[in-house]
Amino acid sequence: MTILERVTALLGEGAVLEAGTDRVPRIAPGSPDAVALLLGTAHQEGWRVRVEGAGTWLPSDAPADLALTTRRLDRVPAVEPQDLTATAEAGIGLDQLRQQFADRGAWLAIDPPGLAGRTLGSIVATATAGPLRQGFGPVKDHLLGVTFVTGDGRMVQSGGRVMKNVAGYDLTRLQAGGFGAFGVIVLVHLRLRALPRADVTHVLEGSRDELTQVAEDIAASGLTPAALELVSPALARRDRWVLAVRLVGSPTLVASDEAGLGRFAKLRAEEAHSFWMRLSEGFAVRPVTFRIGGVPAASDELLDLLQHQVGDEWISAAPAAGAIRWSGETTVDRLQRLRRTLAALEVPLTLERAPWPVRMAVGHFGAYREGAGPLVAGLRRTFDPGGALVVATDGE
Amino acid sequence: MSTAALADDLRAIVGPRHVRAAPAERVTYAMDGLPTHRRLPGVVVLPGTREELIAVIRLLAALDIPFVPRGAGTGLSGGALADDGAVLIVLTRLNRILKIDAANRSALVEPGVVNARLSAATRPHGLHYAPDPSSQSACTIGGNVAENAGGPHCLKYGVTANHILSLEVVLATGETVVLGSPGGEPWGPDLVGLFVGSEGNFGVATRISVRLTPLPRAVRTLLADFMALRAAGEGVSGVIAAGIVPAALEMMDQSCIQAVEDSVYAAGYPRDAAAVLLVELDGRDDGAVAAEADAVTAILKAAGARGVRSAKNEAERERLWQGRKKAFGAMGRLSRDLVVQDAVVPRSSLPDVLETIAGIAARYELVVSNVFHAGDGNLHPNISFDATDEAMRVRVELASAEIMAACIAAGGTITGEHGVGLDKLRYMPLIFDAESLGAMLAVRRVFDPEERVNPGKVVPVHACREWSRAANPGATPRGQPVLAL
């Protein structure tokens, strides 16, 4: 019996999708229990499984015996606008989720890089926050809990559905940014915000140095923008670097903050929408995307370093948060050299997106501070004892 | 090994003044802030430096002796108690603020630094450490990390986990590991996030890098009083649903109001009110904050507030807050003992759950006072009782269990900021299945294969489905204590 025949017998024909160009069978379980059944069987049989969402972010190219896609896990069991919480399955696209929330007057303050249909599970597993991290924090800050299935088919719940929760260890934070190495996320409990009544974007063009200084001045002024993003000319489709400030909240607060901005130009609502959308989508085009995170005061130095080592054509940075995202074409050698250089500065580099050979050689993580490597390896063995999940965590 | 011999070995590391072995000395450490649990530790040791702490842990590792880290002992879950087979490591002497980096809004501290002292030290830089537990004048940052402590202002600024950038941790073996980076970006999976709130089960944080928050330039503090608890709860829901995020949104019920007003912390709360809400709004611009305060006032009045007044000056604001933060102390007037409970419910269910709790209190003939973080749905039903009255103790336990069950039934959880410790172990199987509890135990064994750090807390081992020991083959959890008294 082939793997495909076994899986068809296990989950039914409806779970079998058309395979990609590499002909790896693509399976779409229709429920969290079906994910557990599939992974439990894979563990027993020694099958290697790669996990996919909508296939819009990481390339579907990891060598595996089968591809597990979460795209049929697309239900939204609960939206509670009065509590500003929601529960959604991992395979739903962010665009659909946003619409459902907006219809109820609620808002998920996450704007990750990638195409609009990128799945919630992909965003959580890779912890890819966008410009809104400046005002609303990283992806993990929006999670109340997750349910995940381990590499050997165990279903684990962590966290809960309420705003504060310290019952037990916070396995949700392990899953956020775990790149699927510690299990497959199937259900996510989210913290929402009220749909902002005012949402405006102002931009300023200039040299990178000049705009970095302006960003620092804004941060020091006590303004609390939702986004304060420095964008390279190519990514912004402008002639010069752009500093974009997004302000959200009540009309009074937003108007008050706008008054403190000075010489910025305000974008019309549709211009603002397409500016931020272009920025998100710009990171899903080129083959390699990574993020680095340093202290805010080092942002300028880190941008110089990137320019010198890998170029700075496709860059978006939150100088006041010390977060920088880079995209483009580069080599394994350059990435490894850059990661070593950054590690010496105590700046982690997380490889977010790249073809499999690059992921395998460089690893999503690949550099740890003293003593952390064995802990990560131990956690990996705990949650995927048979090594069923194909994830390039550490590189070669 | 005898306790006397162990005490001598510990004295050789930390000096004779910093080991407590006599029963009378150890009694001081037999409880934390929760009066319903008591354990007498085998030996108490107070290291004065990071190096001494590491040496102590290495000694205990070599001797296979379990240990419990403890800060100021203000915890409310029995989490920092050690039994007579274990050593209690008290971290209050590790109390140095090592660095304040104003440019990057961060500070590096030792675990024994008192929460309020850190904010006082950073105030000249226009910064503060935002998480502000009610015990902040005594509790330590190390304890806050272990419990993932919250506080009134966590509604807007987030709990401890949102403010920790990196940690240096000593594992049970005495090995040191560094988790996180100076900017807060993890090196791979978020081990800082996993460590925060692990209640001392994963090791001891020796150096803690925290994020600092700018002091708000404009602040408005409102006091709203209601003649019905339900109306106050609806006022909370109204503010949250309107998309306003106050810095703090706290509620006190009549029993709590009267205890405060009878005490030296009297804040001017109306004694006849069924509940008061303390709402703080902050921001950059005074005009904008005032406009938000007007919007909140209108929402609360629409929900039935009898009156809403704004603190006229800093002195009045401090007085209003003192009443709230010292409410637990003020309740000492009601009875000789107090159980401060902790649970979280969806915010919209607050009115119903508060009524249910009042019904439970009436049925068990107990005084339950509520003072809590209403904006987060984080309840603190406080049960006044006399611990010398055995029958009353039983009623307190039964009522606590019913309150937890009511919160779980409403879609909530058993603790929002005080932790599981010993006290909530029995409730863990009510919210997590055996597989999920097994996963927690398996993670704990990655950090501490022998389960030697703070044994017997957080995860009820008997309720766990067994996971493979693939992560640490050969390691075995510890059995009976090896210290002989």
Image (tube, coloured by chain):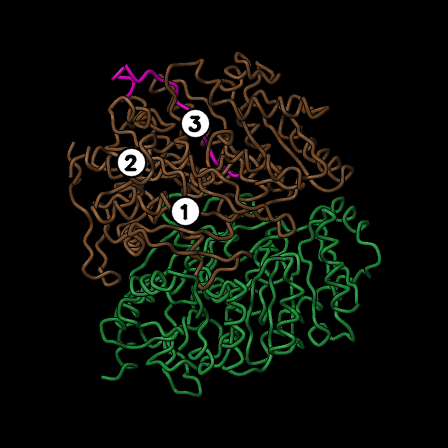
Chain colours: A green, B brown
Counting from the top left corner in percent of width and height, residue B296 is at 67, 34
Residue at 64% across / 47% down in the picture? Answer: B102
Tell me which chain the residue with mark 2 is part of: B
Labels 3, 2: one chain: yes
- In the image, is residue B221 above or below residue A183? above
Residue at 48% across / 37% down in the picture? Answer: B113
Label for residue B381?
Answer: 3
Amino acid, disc 3: Pro
Lateral position of residue B361 relative to residue B223, left or right: left
- In the image, is residue A294 above or below residue B349? below
Residue B389 within the magenta-colored segment of the rendering: yes
The residue under label 1 is B205
Quarter-of-image position of residue A64: bottom left
Q: Are marks 1 and 2 in contact (CB under 8 Å)?
A: no
Q: For residue B423, say whether it is visible.
A: no
Categorize mark 2 by other alpha carbons within 10 Å: few (<14), some (14-19), many (20+): some
Counting from the top left corner in percent of width and height, residue B50 is at 40, 45
- As helix, strand or loop, the secondary structure at mark 1 comes to strand
Amino acid, disc 2: Arg
- In the image, is residue B125 above or below residue A22? above
Q: How far apart in space, not on screen, are marks 1 and 3 (Cα)?
A: 31 Å
Q: Quadrant of the C terminus of chain B?
A: top left
Q: How far apart in space, not on screen, are marks 1 and 2 (Cα)?
A: 22 Å
- As helix, strand or loop, the secondary structure at mark 3 comes to strand
Tell me which chain the residue with mark 1 is part of: B
- Foreground tag (1 vs 2): 2
